[in-house]
Amino acid sequence: MALLEVKDLKVRVEEREILHGLTLTVNEGEVHAIMGPNGSGKSTLSHVIAGKPGYEVTDGQILFKGEDLLEMAPEERAAKGVFLAFQYPVEIPGVATMNFLRTALNAQRKARGESEYSTPDFLKKVREVSKSLNIPQDMLKRGVNVGFSGGEKKRNEVLQMALFEPSLCILDEMDSGLDIDALRIAADGVNALRSPKRAMVVITHYQRLLNYIVPDFVHVMSKGRVVKSGGKQLALELEESGYAQFEDAA
Amino acid sequence: MNVALAKTGSGRAVSDLFASAEGRLPGSPAVIAVRREAFETYEHLGLPHRRIEEWKYTDLRALVGEVLPLAASPDAAALKRAAEAVKAHAIEGARKLVLVDGVFAADLSDVKALGAEVSLKTLRETLEKDAGLLKTASTDAVISLNAAMATDGVVLSIADGAHLSAPIQIIHVATAASVSAFTRSQVAVGKGVRATVVESFVAAGAKAYQVNDAVVLSVGDNADVAHIRLLDDSPDAVNITSQFVTVGANTKLNFFNMTTGAAVSRLQGLITLAGEGSELSINGVNLLKKTEHGDTTLVVDHAVPNCVSREIFRAVIDDRAHSVFQGRIIVRPDAQKTDGKMMTRALLLSDEAEADNKPELEIFADDVSCGHGATAGALDDSLLFYLKARGLPEKQAQALLIQAFVGEAIEQIADDGLREYVIGIAERWLEQRQ
């Protein structure tokens, strides 16, 4: 059984159809890149998988481990192992990062019927992971993402990915707003999380990110559909020729 | 008595309120005369209603309708129930002073533990001599009614230079349903004092009672005082409290109010900065649900130059609840270099929740820095989605954001233990929503 199956998905936002029948299959251990021009529906796909309100699915389905994902609330999806790394992680003043991480992790574990982490175990785990991501401890005491640089926000997303251990990670435009050093640190963090049990969907506008997170498959989206799929060399071809050819194809 | 009460709102019924209580009200004949005069003032004005500017948003005639008869003095069974409630609400280490149904309960209080630096009398005792404590700086209808009917209260005096190691906690316990308790307390804080005074309003199983409390607090020069008020009355109770506060020179006064109970509550305060170089921090959180109505109405009077006042208020309003914040800052002509700021924010958790914010500045000096801000809005959907996408169920995500929202006011409480205690109250309120 595939980990994620998106079948002929049609999605509307306020009467306007954004996805016109999108199909995508992702198996355990695979890394898929989804590329495409602005407005092709890449971020819409990531939001619909995560359960963001405001999108109306008019046709098709999304199965996750064989279950109907669209029937689940966002928090259920998270507990089942879906993780969306946000393009623009929000700032939450007054909610300490550490408190947020513990609350979220324990909420997921509780939903799965697992025991909650004890404080010492949790702290140990956070320390290990944050160290490997070069996240200073004082950052964890601040409000969630408050005053964080673009790079720090993305590293905080990767930190959560490492803590929650999801089976599907969707990285939405992870490279936006990052300089090359920040991008490398974040990408190294993501690469460390690659495993035969975990799949990743890397959404990006530019090929650059894929130099750091090398995909197994590349899909090109245009106007709400996947118009071409291939191996990692497809990304390089796109860098050469641009998206224009696919806009015509769609 | 019951027959008279059936005549809701009529002049005849209120007269009976006083007549039926008069024989039980403490005080010398001269004091009783003062009371009768105060009652006539009240009777002339009647319960405040929306056509009186200060009560525009809290129409007691519509919300309360009638003043319930005076509570009886607590019997042994009532005191026993009160003792349980005191146990549940006592702050660890605090010196407790307990008023049950408006009467000081010495057996439930830590009178001896107050120490030599704190003198305690009861209102009842002082009224045997004179009526001074029944007179206040302003007299609206509810304050006049309080002067007429107050049965007891604590009269505290903290000696100059005293550094109290433990908070003093005044606990008001209601044990009887469908009656009124009228209390009036005075706290005189000497020069150079460091002290914390907590007031708690709680119920011992009682329902639908009314509290009318008045507090006169004076703080001397060079003092550092925390004043915390925790209103956790029964959800169908009424609590109207009037505070008169005077602050000396070079003093820090940190006030915090938290409302988590009562169907109708109003805290009205007049805080006068009477000495230069003082810092006033006034903060509060109202957590309101169902059809609760919570009103905070404060006047900060900068009567002298060079004082700082800061006000941070947060209201969380669920269901059909209604929050009112009226804050006025007065800067008198001489009060140059005044620095006054007031910020009030309301969080509406339902479409039917209501918030009225009315900040006012009255500035008569020309070299001052004053400002106010008021907002009302719902929780941010993008923040909620982020938390839900990380596994938090809706109510838990809301709870985390609400805690952050009220946190800015709560963190003004300097004492770690008391701050944690107040955070705990907020957490329990939020848990009940889940």
Image (tube, coloured by chain):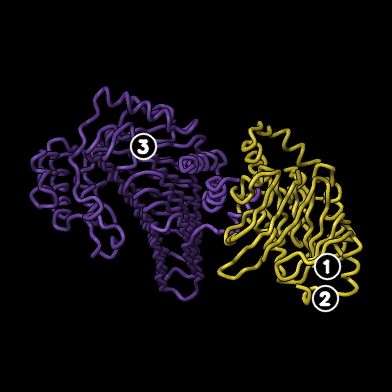
Q: Pointer 2: what residue?
A: A245
Q: CA distance from mark 3 to mark 1?
A: 62 Å
Helix, strand, or loop for circle 1?
loop
Categorize mark 3 by other alpha carbons within 10 Å: few (<14), some (14-19), many (20+). Answer: many
Q: In the visual, does B45 lie left or right of A206?
A: left
| Amino acid type of the residue tagged 1 in the rendering | Tyr
B178 or A71, which lies in front? A71
Residue at image position (69%, 60%) is A45
Q: Nearer the viewer, mark 2 or mark 1?
A: 2
Q: In the visual, does B412 lie left or right of A97?
A: left
Residues at marks 2 and 3 touching, judged by CB atoms closer than 8 Å:
no
Q: Chain B takes which shade in the image?
A: purple
Q: Chain A takes which shade in the image?
A: yellow
Q: Pointer 1: what residue?
A: A206
Mark 2 vs mark 3: tell me if same chain: no
Q: Which mark is residue B179?
A: none
B172 or B395, which lies in front? B395
Displayed quadrant of residue B357? bottom left
Categorize mark 2 by other alpha carbons within 10 Å: few (<14), some (14-19), many (20+). Answer: few
Q: In the visual, does A105 lie left or right of A193?
A: left
Q: Which mark is residue B202?
A: 3
Residue at image position (23%, 55%) is B62
Residue B204 position, x and y percent, is 33, 31
Residue B171 position, x and y percent, is 37, 36
Vertical position of residue B343 compared to residue B416: above or below:
below
Q: CA distance from mark 2 to mark 3?
A: 73 Å
| Amino acid type of the residue tagged 2 in the rendering | Gln
